[in-house]
């Protein structure tokens, strides 16, 4: 009876809030069934177009849900709020671009033996990321995390006859398993201290546990979860898997890991730390409450951010493989994205979403170009870009804008992404972190501009025109227009994020959770 009174009749829950997830689940199931009935000679690219259509439909449902009040079902295990909608749009946009890149990649690369699996595994990974964005419970957060992770492990190893792909997949599984164990260990401490897996209940009880003599265990739980989730965003100290995995994975999957998987990691970090640990306080001088997250823990997040920026950018300097260079660039970008977590401004969510928009556009465009250039030159060396301006001028120009955006040069979205984060750091007197951010950005110019130097100032092996498939041209065009537009009109983007995805919704506990009788 207690269970019935708590959960009520499942049919009475407002399941329409999960329409985007149900759409992706249905399309993934459809693709798996079609793959079974298709003959070996059937062109599997039709699966990619069906999947892309499903992503567009799911995106429509997310947009339709935008602007609604907080809706919570299943005892607050799943909630629809502006936070979830903002990240879901990033996930869906990123995966849509990955599908467009993959259409040509899978068609040309004969070593992906089972292309049907490739497409629906991307959708299951997307489903895991979307569940993570809407979860307000440690259990559903972990389920979404594992669905994303396990799908990613398989996708990295889809080039079955490629030794680097097999090696990177093995390393990814082992590293991911260790990170999962560490994350679960930290979550077990949180559950033991509070007696609940719901983040909002944890937030209510964690301060009492902290002030009752269990402060050491609360801090230990925080650090274990932080270290475990650092794996998902490829931040120090759990970053060394990234170069090998980025290099060995199929290029579209590398793009997926660099944007969608990383964004999902930041979504779960935001949920756990701001909801569960955001209200944690202790009594300070003059018997005034002091936020533990701001007063103590933000310093350690700042150290992780600084270490990621320094190690990522310095290690990228000596890379000759373009995908490994982008892996270390991704580590540095994770450091930049962690800076708002060390300052905890009111605009932290808007800054993170804006940065991810800029990062998504630049990275997807770069990896689309990397794919066609590396395939044409049959090498992943940075020198494969030599003479690209003479072979495909508009592709080289687009690549220039993408690289400048990652470097944080004006008139690009990446510049304002870094600028907003830098200003918030200075405003909160985190001068040392702002200084490291500036210094490492200058260091990054060397390897970013190295790609530009190859395209414009180094002769290539051939002057023949580079063939650009239509799907790749569409991805590059979308990315370069978005990068320039967000760089010219950043206030328009920030105002849209602020008005349509108010951060305060995430901090509001859901309405009555039990379904009506």
Image (cartoon, helix red, strand yellow):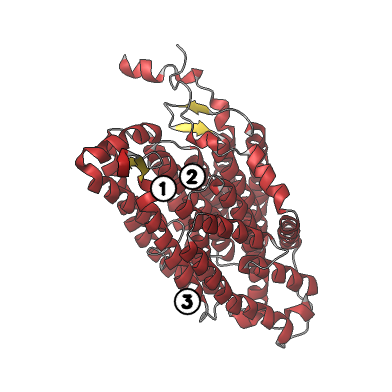
Q: Quadrant of the N terminus?
A: top left
In the image, is 333 to the left or to the right of 240? right
| Residue closest to the eye, 141 or 159 | 141
- Disc 3 marks which residue? 315
Q: Earlier in the sequence, mark 3 or mark 2?
A: 2
Q: Quadrant of residue 5?
A: top left
Structural distance between the alpha carbons of marks 3 and 2: 31 Å
Q: Which mark is residue 128?
A: 2
- Disc 1 marks which residue? 146
User: Residue 313's spot in the image, x, y percent?
Assistant: 51, 73
Which residue is pictured at 39% across the width and 57% down the height? 299
In the image, is 42 to the left or to the right of 151? right
Structural distance between the alpha carbons of marks 3 and 1: 29 Å
Can the viewer see residue 434 in this picture? yes
Structural distance between the alpha carbons of marks 2 and 1: 7 Å
| Residue closest to the eye, 486 or 212 | 212
Q: Find the residue positioned furthest to the top.
A: 517
Badge 3 element: helix
User: Residue 207's spot in the image, x, y percent?
Assistant: 31, 37
| Residue closest to the eye, 169 or 58 | 58
Give neighbour class at mark 3: few <14, some 14-19, many 20+ (Cα, 10 Å): some
User: Residue 246's spot in the image, x, y percent?
Assistant: 50, 67
Give neighbour class at mark 2: few <14, some 14-19, many 20+ (Cα, 10 Å): many
Q: Quadrant of the C terminus?
A: top left
User: Residue 492's spot in the image, x, y percent?
Assistant: 73, 48
Badge 1 element: helix
Badge 2 element: helix
């Amino acid at each position: 009876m207690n269970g019935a009174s708590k959960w009520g009749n499942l049919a009475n829950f407002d399941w329409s809030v999960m329409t985007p997830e149900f759409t992706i689940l249905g399309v993934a199931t459809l693709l798996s069934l079609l793959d079974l009935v298709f003959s070996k000679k059937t062109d599997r690219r039709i699966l990619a177009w069906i999947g892309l259509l499903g992503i567009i439909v799911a995106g429509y449902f997310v947009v339709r849900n935008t602007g609604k009040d907080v809706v919570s079902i299943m005892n607050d295990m799943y909630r629809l709020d502006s936070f979830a909608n903002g990240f879901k749009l990033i996930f869906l946009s990123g995966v849509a671009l990955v599908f467009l890149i993959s259409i040509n990649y899978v068609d040309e690369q004969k070593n992906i033996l089972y292309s049907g699996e490739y497409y629906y595994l991307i959708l299951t990974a997307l489903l895991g990321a979307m569940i993570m964005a809407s979860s307000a419970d440690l259990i559903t957060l972990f389920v979404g995390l594992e669905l994303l992770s396990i799908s990613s492990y398989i996708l990295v190893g889809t080039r079955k006859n490629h030794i680097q792909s097999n090696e990177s997949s093995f390393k990814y599984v082992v590293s991911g398993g260790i990170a999962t164990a560490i994350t679960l260990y930290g979550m077990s401490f949180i559950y033991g201290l509070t007696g609940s897996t719901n983040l909002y209940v944890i937030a209510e009880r964690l301060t009492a546990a902290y002030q009752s003599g269990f402060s050491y265990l609360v801090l230990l739980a925080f650090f274990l979860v932080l270290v475990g989730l650092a794996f998902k965003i490829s931040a120090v100290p759990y970053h060394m898997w990234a170069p090998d995995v980025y290099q060995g994975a199929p290029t579209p999957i590398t793009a997926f890991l660099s944007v969608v998987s990383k964004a999902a990691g930041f979504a779960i970090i935001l949920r756990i730390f701001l909801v569960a640990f955001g209200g944690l306080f202790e009594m300070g001088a003059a018997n005034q409450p002091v936020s533990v997250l701001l007063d103590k823990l933000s310093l350690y997040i700042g150290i992780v951010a600084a270490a990621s920026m320094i190690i990522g950018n310095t290690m990228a300097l000596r890379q000759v493989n373009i995908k490994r260079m982008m892996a270390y660039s991704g580590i540095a970008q994770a450091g930049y994205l962690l800076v708002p977590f060390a300052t905890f401004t009111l605009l932290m969510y808007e800054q993170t979403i804006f940065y991810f928009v800029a990062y998504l556009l630049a990275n997807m465009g770069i990896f689309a170009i990397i794919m066609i250039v590396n395939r044409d030159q049959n090498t992943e060396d940075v020198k494969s870009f030599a003479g690209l301006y003479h072979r495909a001028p508009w592709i080289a120009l687009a690549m220039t804008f993408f690289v400048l955006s990652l470097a944080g040069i004006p008139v690009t979205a990446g510049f304002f992404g870094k600028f907003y984060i830098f200003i918030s750091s200075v405003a909160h007197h985190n001068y040392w972190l702002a200084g490291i951010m500036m210094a490492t950005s200058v260091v990054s110019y060397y390897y970013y501009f190295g790609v530009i130097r190859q395209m414009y100032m180094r002769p290539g092996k051939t002057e023949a025109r580079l063939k650009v498939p239509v799907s790749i041209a569409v991805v590059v065009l979308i990315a370069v227009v978005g990068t320039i537009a967000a760089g010219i009109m950043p206030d328009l983007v920030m105002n849209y994020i602020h008005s349509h995805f108010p951060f305060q919704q995430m901090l509001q506990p859901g309405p009555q959770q039990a379904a009506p009788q």
